[in-house]
Amino acid sequence: MSWQALRNRVVLPLAGVLIVLAAWQATLLAYDLPVVVLPPPWLVAVTLVKLLGTAAFWRDVAVSVYEFAVGYVLGGVLGVAIGMLIGEWRGFRLAATPVVESLRFVVPFAWIPLTILWFGTSFTGKVVLVAYAVFFVMVVSTSRAIATVDPTLSRVGVALGMNRWRLAWAVHLRAAAPTLASAARAAAAIGWIAVVAAEYIGASAGLGLMITNAASSLATAVVIAGMVVIGLVGAGVSALIGWLARARLDYR
Amino acid sequence: MRALGSLHARLAPRAHAWILGCAGVAIGLAVWTLMAHVLATGGGVINRLPTPARVLAELTRYASGDLWRDLLFSLRVFALGWAIGAASATIVGLVLGRVRWLGSVFIPIVEAIRPVSSIAWVPLSIVWFGFGLGGKVFLVALAVFLVVIVYAIDGSRRVSPALERTATMLGMNGWQRFRSLVLPGTLTEVLIGSRVALMAGWGTVIVAELVAADSGLGAHLISVEQSYDGPAVMAAMACFGITGFLMNALFVRVERRIMPWRHDSNEAGS
Amino acid sequence: MSEHGGELAVEQVSHRYVVGGRTTPVLDNVSFTIPAAQVACVVGPSGCGKSTLLSLAAGLFAPSSGTLAWDGAPVRLGRTQHLGMAFQQPGLFPWLTVRQNVAIGLRTRGKGRVEARRIAEEFLATVGLGEFQDAYPAHLSGGMAQRVGIARALALRPRLLLLDEPFAAVDAFTRLKLQHELLALLKRYRPTVMFVTHDVAEAIAVGDMIVVMSDRPASVSRIIPVGREDKNRASAAFARKLAETLECLGVGSDSAVE
């Protein structure tokens, strides 16, 4: 890596992080804030390390991640399937569009109370919520991607004698794959945050619940550590999906 | 049946779209009603599915009652948060975008924090601000900030080279350049970003109110949920969606008026 | 070697497009016959309906009036078993290698996976594309990709080959090379060919007959036979044939040959 690149990609951002940490510490000193309001950075770090050694913490994380994963796969598969139907079949698209458009503005978070009403604070409710959020993103992206496939590829497929289904599966879906991969990452971000939000509002277990409990008992260091974990898991999931996509789907 | 088919095909394509669209909605409502009846006799997990008719009735009742009060509270939170978020994002974005070294230092941090939705900050805001207006405005402002900042940074940097050359030829100094080139470009992008941030902000309002549960649409939503009032829950969700839709439509209109040459396609963000 | 092509007969074909409320006539009473295993080059002004003619020959849709007959029987819609088509854009599937692109056509036509791969490999080797078999379309130049596109069509051993301005998007020098190669392949596999082009010189070089179309709504202005002696670009016969065709197209022949 050249000196320029090293400076820009490593040194300066690192300096930025240090500046933020320094500002954090300085604010503490300047205003003499109680620990419950703003714990010092080292306390957060220590708390995080302690959490990582606690079984209960890992249990909570596992619950949240599991709820997310199941909902994600469910919503993703359904979303792509229905999205393909909408993209391929004009009649279906015209019929489904008003329904999809009207639901678009009822964001996943607005569904949280309803899922609690129906499923209580259980696992099922969270899965349904994540599935809905992911489904929506994937349906819209898939239908749009299928509709914008290079027409030459379709013509070639027809000329080779492909029937409608073969064309949709072997050509359209493959051509749309890179776009779907980006959409899958966006959907993962939304799905993950939906789980966390749902757990803030009504849950019997999970990362969000752990953080809310910490907030009620003013264990601010735990709260901030929990937020870091949320960010890390989100980043991890996103990176995983990106890696999978690049390995298998992205032909560009 | 075939006569119907050929009639169908002969109608103008737009009528075709309308008919199918209405059919889609009608089928959706029919399925909904059917499921509500099926499940009412005790089948399965969802044992409280109100019919569309009941939801509509509840919606009308709410609209003639507390809806406007709750809506006003929510909109107030939203407007404040949105304004603060957009304004601060513009300023910070301008600075980070134009001052090279500052950008290199702080933009990576912004990029790292951005994916962590402001929703994650809810418990922290409770600790800091309690359950009142301040906390909710903070969360909405943060959500809007995180969306708009990218547009602001992009906009402040992206001045077309042709314009730069013109400015040099005219002999503009730094301040003039800023006013005539950088600022309008940035504000244009910020406007677009603010519209994208609409849904992010509005969604954050609801989460903040679901947690804080003191006033507003979200608080109403949680309270009817706790009283097991299915129709009211769905009615409140509908209100939320309709408001979001109206705000978005209004904003698109405004955007088109102010910037007829830019037409960003309306993507479903968060 | 597979059986060579049959006869394609176009009889009094007219076609209209209806878009929105407007009707656009595209073909007007077009009639000509391509004898078995012959190459017919269809030339005419841009947008005169040449591509429509090709699509009708492929059985993609039915003409508004008139008939097309292949091998003595009417062209059936959706039947593509006997066809191979290549377009202006090579249309290679970007997620498949060159070999897989050729193989997928064979598989769609019913060959097993192993057999399709074998045939694809053999064919690519025969046409001199053997070393590119594992390359992805993104790594190919325009000319190379077009070669693969045509190879993909020919690997199916079509009895009817339909080419829609296949060399139009390629630079002039590559175009000449591709014409050469195509001629060699056609001589080897002998399908019946309808080759649409706007390049008159190309039509003379490749075709056994030139079908000159008029402007839209297109009808056949004339059918000009092309003999072997006309194909030598340096010959006077070539120049004469060129002049004759250009005149038929209504273009002055004293301008330089393109």
Image (cartoon, coloured by chain):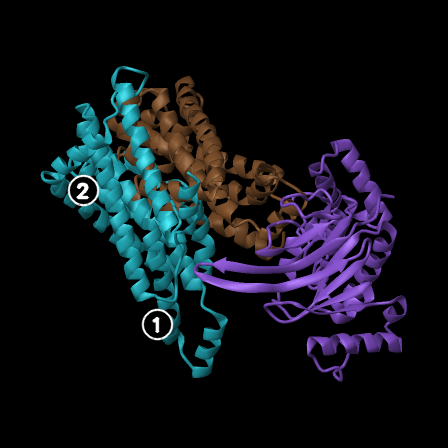
Chain colours: A brown, B cyan, C purple
Mark 2 residue crowding within 10 angstroms, few (<14) / some (14–19) / many (20+): some
Q: Amino acid at mark 1?
A: Arg
Counting from the top left corner in percent of width and height, residue C249 is at: 70, 75
> To which chain does the residue with label 2 belong?
B
Specify which label sits upstream in the sequence, 2 or 1: 2
**Location of residue A194 (image quadrant):** top left
Mark 1 residue crowding within 10 angstroms, few (<14) / some (14–19) / many (20+): few
Q: Amino acid at mark 2?
A: Leu
**Location of residue C35 (image quadrant):** bottom right
Residue at horizontal 50 percent and vertical 48 percent from the top? A147
**Location of residue C115 (image quadrant):** top right
Residue placed most toward the observer, B91 or C160: C160
Q: Is residue B185 left or right of residue B247?
A: right
Which label is found at residue C15?
A: none
Residue placed most toward the observer, A40 or C189: C189
Which label is found at residue B133?
A: 2
Residue at horizontal 76 percent and vertical 84 percent from the top? C254
Distance from the alpha carbon under mark 2 to that under mark 1: 36 Å
- Does residue B127 show up? yes
The image quadrant where one finds the N terminus of chain C is top right
Residue placed most toward the observer, A181 or A151: A151
Element carrying mark 2: helix
* Residue that carries the numbered disc 1 in the rendered image: B179
